[in-house]
Amino acid sequence: MDNFLQIENGKAIPRAAIPEVSFDLFFKSISQFVKDDGFIVQFFVYEEANVYKLLAVVRNSNLYAISTEIGTRFQSFTRSVSEKFHMFEREIAEQFGLKPDGHPWLKMVRYHKNFTGKEDVFGNNYDHDIPGNYSYFQVNGESIHEVGVGPVHAGIIEPGHFRFQCAGEEVLHLEIQLGYQHRGIEKMLPALPHKRYPIICESIAGDTTIAHSLCFSQAFEGLGGLTVDKGAKIVRSMALELERLCNHIGDLGALSGDVAFNPPAAYFGRIRGEFLNLLQVLGGNRFGKGLVRPGGVTHVMGDEQRRLIRDKLAEITPEIEHISDLLFGAPTVLARFEHTGTVEHSVAKELGLVGYAGRACGIPYDARVTFPNECYGELPANTNSVTNGDVNSRATVRREEIMHSLTLINILLDKTETTAEEVHMQECSLSPDSFVVTVNEGWRGEVSHCLLTDNDGKVQRYKVKDPSFHNWTGLAMSLRNQEISDFPLCNKSYNLSYCGFDL
Amino acid sequence: METYISFALAVLAAPLFPGIILKVKAFFAGKNGPPLLIKYYTLIKLLRKGSVYSTSTTFVFKLGPIVSFAAALTVLLFFPFAGQAPLLSFHGDVIVLFYIMGIGRFFTVIAALDTASPFEGMGAAREVFFSTLAEVTIFTVLILFYRMSGSLSLATYFTGENPITLMGQSGALILLVIIAMFMVLLAENSRVPVDDPATHLELTMIHEVMILDHSGPDLALIEIGAFLKLIFYAAFITQLIFPFDVLNGITRGLIFLGILSLIYVFIGITESIMARFRMDLVPKFILTSFALVFFAAILTMGVFQ
């Protein structure tokens, strides 16, 4: 622990304060930390004067930072320490052409040229189209068959490829290959003027607009010394909870539709629309775009808005309770949900699952409780009763979070503080040579942004992490020895983001 | 003459009834639902379109829809609608007609395999497995009916002096048959809880996934074939419920239509109040229907010997 620097969520620190240790010490410290129930928040490389620095932000009940210098090859943590590093190391290999030695699953993540112009670790020629040089894991044997789904799917969803190795109806292995939506956000951001940042960050994942724009805004507030008044914090917390409600309710409906149980699917679909409309009442956009900005919010919540939201909640809360009872009370639905797509607690912990996917496996981590910002310090926490790791647990956790979020919004509505004025995006001077990491509990789980500024106060490295980055592997594990016909149900119970992963 | 009219009516009205199912499901979901004639509109739309064929397919792929449609149409020729003498009837026609249905399915399956798509292969495997199980139930029903009427002709079962109905001598046994045949109807026509006709998720489909690559008029033929097959099973159950021989003319036809519609309504209700089974429960569901009719068949042995 001595080698780590304890940091705070959203608070900028000078870069010089981050301890830089030798790689051996770094390896030893991180290994020990992860073995003692530590998890990774950020694990990325940045380039400085032709030297590559590996920076890790890790958490237990606090946040810590540590860094080291690495060469073009470094020892992989994945095989010898923990599966938690798996995706992060592949990302580093892809972004900077640095090879993690001994990585057991070294494949590309998003299919793009590395930032440094080095020779490609995967031997890809990027003048060719996707999917490039990607070797799928294969199972051989008589009666083994392979099913490939996507990247173009039957529904209006995002692109991603799923490769199943099956013995009859049973899935032995599922490999998920993404990257079709890679837009190069991390590389693009440092080159842009500040006014474009919020627009880009809102679009990292369209269904997690509020959480990502909160992460960005808090990072700029930390670096630019901006303060946010109480009224704006209330609006931001409410927006985050409304976003959670829209998505959880929409997903419960979709889960119901996937098992061909129509009534809740229809009712939840309508109610999701009601919450999107409330988000518009609050911030002028049904998906929460253009609301959160560094220093505050662009819409002042007046009595009119409070009344509209309060009345609507009073109207639909009993409906939600009814429909949840209908869904979770139907024996045929429970027969489909229970024992489907189970991820053991130990596996979930080894993978470092976050959000409801983690909580459904008995990992209670909730960034709103552990690293509270905005109004969350004064709001009650949620607990989950069903944590078996199956589809039923994930659905029940969401049901509980829906009721919890409704309570939170009602508490927030009772607070009388109103923000003084609208705040819009403006150029702000960021403190030079600084570092900040922000963590928020988006509806899917822990969303985190990390910024490093250079000595002119310009953004040097912008690192984004969506919870899907952790959780896609969880979906793959859910399908082990599961019937292939249960895949859509398992997939919907996670409902992970493709674009949030692809960046 | 009436025979021709009832056959023509059945074929023409077949796409109407699935509209009833959709309406019932929409009612349970608190929606207006599509218009009652939606299936006609869909068919007209499909028939006006062109067909797209994958370069990896052969003539087998084009044969699938035609044969499955022809099979479904042929089967209806044997059916005594509302106790009306059918167009075709001979000793042993029940066995022929169920195997004609089998031919239709066989061609749908090889057309699916012809696409070489892994989804369609999976769907075909499921379809064949589940319908093999359903066949056991169907033939046990025929054994039962043979014991009751001494005949192997559909027309004899449902027309004449002693039709097999719920109101007849061994009505209690027919109750079991009705339940079993309703379960078979759900399984054979890819309805919830066995299959989900509304899903777009290829990996969970059974029947729908086999026809993913068909388009335009080919798809229309497959759809009509499915409507005809559904009306066959629904009419079969309708006949079991009511003895049409006791009434005459228009009344008989109207009661027939009424009960037939009620069966479709009942399908809609079933689909609204329950979720799909997990795939590995489907065989148990179908075999339950077999257990019911097998039990009924055993009882007849005691009764008549």
Image (cartoon, grey):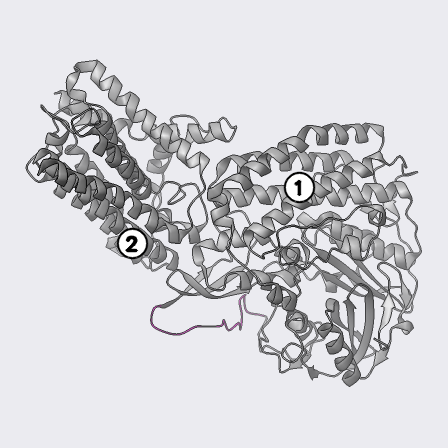
* Disc 2 packing (10 Å; few <14; some 14–19; many ≥20): few
Q: Nearer the viewer, residue A213 or B282?
A: B282
Q: Percent x, y for residue A141?
A: 37, 74
| Left or right of residue A435, residue A201 in this image | left
Q: Main secondary structure of the magenta part?
A: loop
Q: Percent x, y for residue A471?
A: 63, 60
Q: Chain of mark 2?
A: B
Residue range of the region highlighted in magenta in the rendering: A127-143
Q: Are marks 2 and 1 in contact (CB under 8 Å)?
A: no
* Disc 1 packing (10 Å; few <14; some 14–19; many ≥20): many
- Indicate whether residue A146 is drawn in magenta: no
Q: Percent x, y for residue B262?
A: 33, 25
- The image quadrant where one finds the N terminus of chain A is bottom right
| Left or right of residue A473, residue B275 in this image | left
Q: Which mark is residue B129?
A: 2
Discs 2 and 1 carry the same chain letter: no
The mark lying in front, picked from 2 and 1, is 2
Q: Chain of mark 1?
A: A
The answer to which image quadrant residue A46 occupies is bottom right
Whether residue B77 appears in this view of the structure is: yes
B19 vs B62: above or below? above
Tell me the residue at 71%/50% (across/down): A383
- Disc 1 target residue: A246
Tell me the residue at 91%/57% (across/down): A224
* Disc 1 element: helix
Amino acid found under the numbered disc labelled 1: Cys
A119 vs A41: above or below? below
